[in-house]
């Protein structure tokens, strides 16, 4: 049966959309091919057509950049993370990288086509972040490669590079009778020391990478471990598993370094017939020598949980460099974690040797959980538990960012729904005002009031547009504009908001490039930055800060040109190298604390105390109210603002109220009152307060 297919080619300037179209085209072609093959087979060999939508959904993983290529190295499908990193027009191994990196990718492709899979741990050396790359051959005809690129942090790469077992560290440890290997989560060897290679294979130059670690060892009937090549003629080894990173979460495909372990084989230093106690003491000394040299945070305890030793890296991790180790590990953690840690140390210190990890909060850093690894060791005298400390603050921050993003998505959806409904109400109000203005002329008693209602409605409509923009439910209206023009528009309002004590300075670079932005949103950003700068100056002045003890200060608004070369120096992961026009707002306030910096772009985050922020002049309140009456509320307010005037409104006689309420600087207006009456009263109270008079 012949199957005819019609293919529609779409052009788009969006790389993400191009990748989606590529995926759709692959689904169409492969689906048609599978259908034709299915029709050509006899009934008993019939196969169900694949559900390609599942494949497309499966590769949409923000944690990995994933691409699928065919035999001709053409890009068949890619997820959005890949498109953002490399672009939709590039297919591995031909990516926009330097020559050595391209050679690595080409080698991965050759080996993956030949052997089924290949991977490298680090593609980019020396950068802040690099890539680990893996390629797997897949498909019914083995005619596709699935490429997976995972970002690895500089911290992890630095740790692994410091553990270069083929260098001086591995040689020194071998001389001390300690052979070392780094393994992946599945037990496959990543690298070994020369001494390990010589004892396991007879060739110290052998890499042994890719071999099963356990296959190179054997155990006798007394559960003692030997190198398989040496057999019982060799010396027994004590095996210690030191986790280098936390294991991957359930359901997450592990990267090449996730769950990696440092395997230590401590030579007992004696043959089968020698005494075990002397070997134990020798092993302890060797292990302490090892711990002192490793860049990992490692320590040992006895069976009762008392510290025996801790290397410098461990002391730095727990902020105890000057004071040394406390008696017990539980002295390092917060009260809520003490019982669980004590339990874990005792459990690993007795019975069969086991290993594991747990999250604990250190006393000096209670808000950032860290991962503490525990491994039981046997045959080393007093040493019973090996502790390893991994800094998981980066992972914790990422989890918080994901949780915050999820929360903000929900808030955005809610804000968008409210804004849509409110827009409908505003449309009716503005339309009614327009109709009323047709029946009134300037000079009528109601004309100015209607105009005021219409103006306030338009301001409210502007707020709803911002809500819609925040919730991504409204396309912004970007225009090609010049930053100095926008700054000039908002400068008069900024000057009024800053007040008399804060000077305002503007300076523009020459030959500024045009920018593309929504002018209303840009004006709002500039206003917010200026107001926050004003608050920082006033707060610093209120606290007696240096440079502006009386709340006096200076705010500068600057525009600058930045070249592509300068933009690279910024070190931003999301800012591609290009020429930029920059808007800078400077102030001489107290600055931004380091702990606040990660929250700068959270829409609803504020450093102001609850209830602060609204720099007010008069309290107008009823006397009798549910929960808290007016006088009680005013007394609470006066604790913060002793001189603020108060205007009470009530249906009771003023004389009775004044005899019952003993509050200075109190004013009164009787109910009912007209708009004119309360306006006149408020004006009188404000004039009285300004003149410092009392009623």
Image: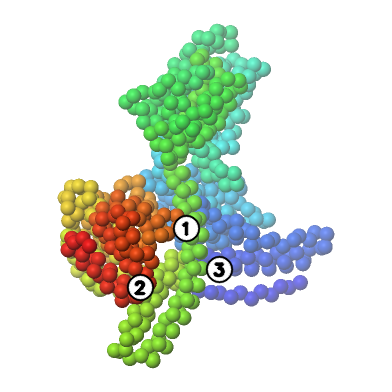
* Residue 278 visible in the picture: yes
Q: Is residue 245 left or right of residue 141?
A: left
Write down the residue under mark 1. 408
x and y, in percent, of residue 98 in the image: 40, 53
Bin the neighbour count of mark 2 within 10 Å (Cα to Cα): few under 14, some 14-19, many 20 and up.
few
Disc 2 or 3, which lies upstream in sequence?
3
The chosen color scheme is rainbow
Structural distance between the alpha carbons of marks 1 and 3: 29 Å
Give the Cα separation between the discs numbered 2 and 3: 68 Å
Mark 3 surroundings within 10 Å by alpha-carbon count, few (fewer than 14), some (14 through 19), many (20 or more)? some
Q: Locate residue 671 relative to residue 548 in the image: left or right.
A: right
Residue closest to the eye, 540 or 148? 540
In depth, the one of 658 and 308 nearer the eye is 658
Q: Image quadrant of residue 582? A: bottom left
Vertical relation: 609 (above or below) 323: below
Reading the image, the residue beneath label 3 is 21
Tell me the CA gap for discs 2 and 1.
Answer: 45 Å
Sequence-wise first label, 2 or 1: 1
> Residue at (67%, 56%) from the top-left corner?
141
Give the structural element (helix, strand or loop) at label 3: helix
- Residue found at x 68% / y 61%: 51
Reply above or below: 513 against 190.
below
Q: Position of residue 435 (x, y in %)?
A: 42, 88
Q: Residue furthest right?
A: 44
Q: Position of residue 385 (x, y in %)?
A: 51, 23
Q: Quadrant of residue 224?
A: top right
The C terminus lies in which quarter of the figure?
Answer: bottom left
Q: Position of residue 272 (x, y in %)?
A: 59, 11
Q: Which residue is mark 2?
A: 673
- Give the camera-side residue of 331 and 60: 331
């Amino acid at each position: 049966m012949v199957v005819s297919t019609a293919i529609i080619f779409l052009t788009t300037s969006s790389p993400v959309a191009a990748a989606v179209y590529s995926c759709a085209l692959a689904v169409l072609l492969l689906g048609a091919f599978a259908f034709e093959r299915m029709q050509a087979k006899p009934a008993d060999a019939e196969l169900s057509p694949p559900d390609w939508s599942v494949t497309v959904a499966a590769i949409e993983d923000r944690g990995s950049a994933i691409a699928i290529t065919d035999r001709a190295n053409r890009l068949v499908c890619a997820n959005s993370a890949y498109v953002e990193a490399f672009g939709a027009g590039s297919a591995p191994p031909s990516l926009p990288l330097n020559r050595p990196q391209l050679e690595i990718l080409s080698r991965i492709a050759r080996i993956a086509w030949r052997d089924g899979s290949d991977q490298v741990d680090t593609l980019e050396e020396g950068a802040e972040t690099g890539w680990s790359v893996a390629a797997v051959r897949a498909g019914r005809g083995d005619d596709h490669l699935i490429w997976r690129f995972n970002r690895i942090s500089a911290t992890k790469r630095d740790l692994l590079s410091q553990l270069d077992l083929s260098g001086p560290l591995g040689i020194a440890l071998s001389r001390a009778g300690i052979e070392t290997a780094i393994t992946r989560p599945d037990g496959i060897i990543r690298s070994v020391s020369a001494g390990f290679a010589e004892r396991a294979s007879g060739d110290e130059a052998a890499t042994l990478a890719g071999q099963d670690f356990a296959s190179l060892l054997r155990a006798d009937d007394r559960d003692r471990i030997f190198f398989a090549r040496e057999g019982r003629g060799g010396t027994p080894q004590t095996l210690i598993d030191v986790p280098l990173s936390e294991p991957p979460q359930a359901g997450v495909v592990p990267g090449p370094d996730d769950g990696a372990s440092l395997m230590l084989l401590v030579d007992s230093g004696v043959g089968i017939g020698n005494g075990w106690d002397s070997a134990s003491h020798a092993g302890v000394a060797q292990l302490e020598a090892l711990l002192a040299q490793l860049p990992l945070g490692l320590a040992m305890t006895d069976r009762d949980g008392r510290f025996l030793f801790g290397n410098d890296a461990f002391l730095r991790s727990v902020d105890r460099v000057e004071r040394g180790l406390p008696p017990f590990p539980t002295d390092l953690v917060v009260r809520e974690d003490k019982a669980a840690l004590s339990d874990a140390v005792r459990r690993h210190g007795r019975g069969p040797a086991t290993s594991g990890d747990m999250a604990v909060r250190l006393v000096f850093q209670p808000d950032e959980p860290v991962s503490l690894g525990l491994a039981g060791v046997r045959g080393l005298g007093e040493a019973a538990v090996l502790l390893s400390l991994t800094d998981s603050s980066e992972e914790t921050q990422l989890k918080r960012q994901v949780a915050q993003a999820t929360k903000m998505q929900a808030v955005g959806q809610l804000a968008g729904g409210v804004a849509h409904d409110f827009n409908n109400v505003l449309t009716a109000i503005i339309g009614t005002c327009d109709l009323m203005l047709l029946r009134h002329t300037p000079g009528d008693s109601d004309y100015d009031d209607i105009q005021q209602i219409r103006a306030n409605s338009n301001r409210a409509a502007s707020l709803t547009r911002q809500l819609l923009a925040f919730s991504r439910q409204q396309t912004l209206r970007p225009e090609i504009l010049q930053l100095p023009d926008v700054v000039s528009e908002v400068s008069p309002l900024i000057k009024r908001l800053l007040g008399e004590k804060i000077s305002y300075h503007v300076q523009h670079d020459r030959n500024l490039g045009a920018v593309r932005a929504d002018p209303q949103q840009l004006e709002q950003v500039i206003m917010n930055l200026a107001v926050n700068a004003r608050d920082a100056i006033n707060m610093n002045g209120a606290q007696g800060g240096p440079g502006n003890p009386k709340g006096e200060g200076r705010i500068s608004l600057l525009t600058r040109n930045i070249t592509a070369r300068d933009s690279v120096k910024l070190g931003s992961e999301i800012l591609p190298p290009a020429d930029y026009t920059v808007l800078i707002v400077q102030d001489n306030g107290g600055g931004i604390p380091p702990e606040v910096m990660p929250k700068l772009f959270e829409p609803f985050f504020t450093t102001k105390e609850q209830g602060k922020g609204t720099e007010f002049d008069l309290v107008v309140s009823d006397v009798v109210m549910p929960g808290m009456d007016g006088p009680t509320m005013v007394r609470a307010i006066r604790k913060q603002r002793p001189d603020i005037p108060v205007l009470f409104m009530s249906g009771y006689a003023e004389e009775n109220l004044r005899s019952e309420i003993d509050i200075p600087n109190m004013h009164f207006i009787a109910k009912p009152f007209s708009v004119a009456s309360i306006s006149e009263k408020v004006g009188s109270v404000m004039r009285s307060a300004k003149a410092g008079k009392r009623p």
